[in-house]
Amino acid sequence: MRYSGWQVLAQGLMGNKGWKPAWRDPAPKPEYDIIIIGGGGHGLATAFYLAKEHGLRNIAVLEKGHLGGGNIGRNTTIVRANYSMPGNSEFYSHSLKLWEGMEGELNYNVMHSQRGLINLFHSDGQRDEYARRGNAMINQGDDAILLDRDGVRRMLPYLDYEQTRFPIYGALYHPRGGTARHDAVAWGYARGADSRGVDLIQRCEVTGIDVENGKVTGVQTTRGAIRAKKVGIVVAGRSSQVAALAGMRLPIESHILQAFVTEGLKPVIDNVVTYGMGHFYISQSDKGGLVFGGDLDFYASYAARGNLPMVEHVVEAGMTLMPMIGRAKMLRSWGGIMDMSPDGSPVIDKTHIDGLYLNCGWCYGGFKAVPGSGFSFAHLMATDRHHAPAAGYRLDRFATGRSLMDEEGTGSQHNLH
Amino acid sequence: MRLTCPHCGDRDLREFSYKGHASYLDRPGPDAAPEAWNDYLHLRDNPAGDTRDLWFHELGCSAWLVVTRNTITHAISAVALARDSKGARDAH
């Protein structure tokens, strides 16, 4: 069924009895050409682009829980292309272009809102760094505007400009940045993949990866063995465990990142705002809740919940930056499990096993990468060649030291990115 | 989460900073192969369950600690001084 305003009207007049499930719930077949392990945003996008861009049909996505139940449903929904390093900037630039065409491509309302991203800076040095970053973004073909203090004040009059410790000097404004409805992105890609014949198989955990003579031949699952010519691992949050099934030890440490939402309020924060010194970022959802977050909890964890010291730190940073939010009641906090890599950048690559591909290491930047990651991983799996914008995301860059993409220059410790 | 420092006793998490897995104690020798350094700096078992990691009692006695901790429940089963933690050097 094609979704449209007319459908909404017609179904409304008919008591909404005509809506059909958005995707099938098939049993696994004994064999597929391609198996994607992981039914999150990246896995579903990969399946969608394998079908749409490469004309492949015999594809399954295996998900141990339910579709979109991992980090795609737990993030703070920010979409941006403000990276500065070669390898990253062309990838996120490509991904943002896919975002801009996503709703038409998927026939699905993902509520993509280019409300603008404003990164504040608080010192001369930080201004220079953001000016350089803005130039890199413009050279990449994206948009960036360096705002001075008065320029920021016109857009964000509610900030505390008089704070003495980290006074606001200005901001880098990225107008095409914004937010999207995170669950809808997973659902839209799921529906698009399913309608092109992809089998989305839920409650199907992969328990083994079959390899013969250095070539992948299929997977073992809780719903039986399934043969496959190619297998892609796209399971950020559990990458180390699934890769270990193929004898791999990854350059990843899993960390927890907390996020928070308040009660619904009338519109008060129009953009996405980040506090360059306190590591605090905030936007307001279309439902009215203030959605915000900060740093990792910094210790390795799979708990999907954090501890109070980071809650306190994030709230303090928020209150320092915008005291007006102090009266808002916080409704929920939760945590997502981040694949932290040694340079803060991800991996989209082949493995040492023929036919086995790996997509992981998104740190805490995976949401905005969903379309680009799916597109580039599908290209790699279908053609065995790296897609140009993602060609830097090689697994061997850590062993060789070549082309590391450490945007923040914090070194190889996993939790410092 | 609270940690019991062998010197200072039961203390708030805010006093401690986290370095990484206890295999950081296993620094390769100066003549080690590049693969050993890749292994040391980058690759991790990254267990979902019990792990041993390295913490620094930054706002306390400045001791380096090896903490045995569950990454799913955050339960802490042991805290030892890193300098006494021979086992940590043998474990990955």
Image (spheres, helix red, strand yellow):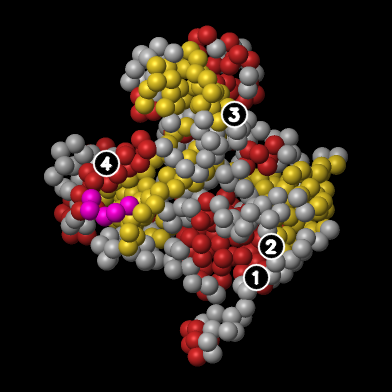
For disc 2, the marked residue is: A200
Query: What amino acid is found at the position of numbered circle 3 in the picture?
Result: Asp
Chain designation of label 1: A
Badge 2 vs badge 1, beta-carbon distance below 8 Å: yes
Give the number of the mark in front: 4 or 3: 3
Mark number displayed over residue A23: 1
Residue drawn at x 50%, y 9% as measured from the top left: B83
Residue drawn at x 62%, y 25% as measured from the top left: B39
**Is A300 left or right of A190, judged from the image as shown?**
left
Label 4 crowd bin: few (<14), some (14–19), many (20+), radius 10 Å: some
What's the CA distance linking mark 2 and mark 1?
A: 8 Å
Q: Position of residue A248 (x, y in %)?
A: 69, 35
B23 lies above or below A235: above
Residue at the left extreme? A162
Mark number displayed over residue B50: 3
| Count of labels in the image | 4
A35 lies above or below B52: below
Residue at the right extreme? A213
